Image: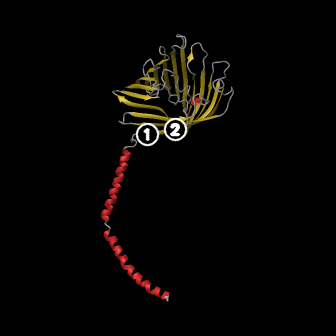
Amino acid sequence: MKLFKSLLVAPATLGLLAPMSATANEVTINDFNAAEEIAVTNSRVDGLEARLNNFEAGSFSETTTASFSTDFAIGSVDGLGATTALPDGNQTLQAVYGFQIDLNTSFTGEDSLDIAIDAGNGSSAGPLGEFDLNGGSDALTVDGVSYTFPLGGLTAIVGDNTDGSALFTTACVYGGPSNTLDDCGNVNAGITNGGAMAGASYDFGNGFTAALGYAGPETGIMTKGSLDAYGANVAYSADSYGLSLTYGVLETTATDDSTYTALNGYYSFDNGLNVSAGYEIGDIGGAVDAEDESINYFVGVNGEVGAGELGAALGTSGGQIEGQTEELMYEVYYSYPVNDGMTITPLIYVKEQAASTTPDQTGVMVKTSFSF
């Protein structure tokens, strides 16, 4: 009996719900205005686009670029006992790294704001110091800030922790990776002491250029309270050769300074072989007899061999004081580009030591460099 009543009630219920459903559908369709809804949607999209444009306008300039590089070095140096805590004859395999970010931006198209940020554990005093990797710490630090801009007919630069010789032209095309010989004999005249710096250069055209530079500590700039450095450079560059003359004055005490003059030149043969040479002479103030001189010289050859570059060089290992035992360094390297962003560079060198009780240093190491 209950089942029979249920069967009678069900059709009646469905009859009541059907008109209500039809009414609801009519209300929904009639209330929907396609044109108004599209207008609202377009308005919201326009608002989102405007916000995005405002964000882009307030973020990085479209002229800002960033480049990244990472170096891994592994190798061993024999003969470090006299300069490190390692015993003589130590040949322990060492591994270090360096990482750098270079940020560059221009505001006028003719200027350049440059910031270098780096990290690494490749101390210059360590066994692999010849590769001159970043050795501050594993934390990123600002390594240099500079701003280059046109000033009349000159190119000017100001910065901090940047070489005072940043605008100098040293006539050398040798591409060796070692820290000792990579300055091509222009060791002191091309002032490199950090701190505050400023400089200017002028391009006369036809290959002739001239530049001035200053570097000193951030406090006591150009006063007796600081030890400053000043330099000047003139250069000529042709299609296959170049010459440069660099002069530097480095204050050593409040009353003494040292002066250095460096002459550099290179010649590139038609077969791709390059020969570079440099000679520097200096008068050291205060530290030694005024008649004594400091001498540095360098000769290097490099050129394409196969897919990479082979180079060899010899030069003085630091300033050679007149009358003292001469110390030379010899090196051979091969730089091989594995691809556009990766280069492998093995280096073999021998660095002489003046003391008869100190063995010469012999280094064998490989550096792998990534740029992206």
- Residue 300, position in %: x, y? 55, 25
Residue to which mark 2 is pinned: 69
Which of the two residues, 280 or 2, is positioned nearer the viewer here? 2
- Residue 269, position in %: x, y? 50, 28
Count the numbered circles shown.
2
- Residue 226, position in %: x, y? 46, 20
Mark 1 crowdedness (10 Å alpha carbons): few <14, some 14-19, many ≥20: few
The amino acid at mark 1 is Thr
Which of the two residues, 61 or 24, is positioned nearer the viewer here? 24
- Residue 28, position in %: x, y? 34, 70
Residue 258, placed above or below residue 337: above
Residue 191, placed above or below residue 24: above
Q: How is the image coloured?
A: secondary structure
Q: Residue at x 66, y 21 (%)?
A: 358
Residue to which mark 1 is pinned: 65
Query: Helix or strand or loop: what does disc 1 sit on?
Result: strand
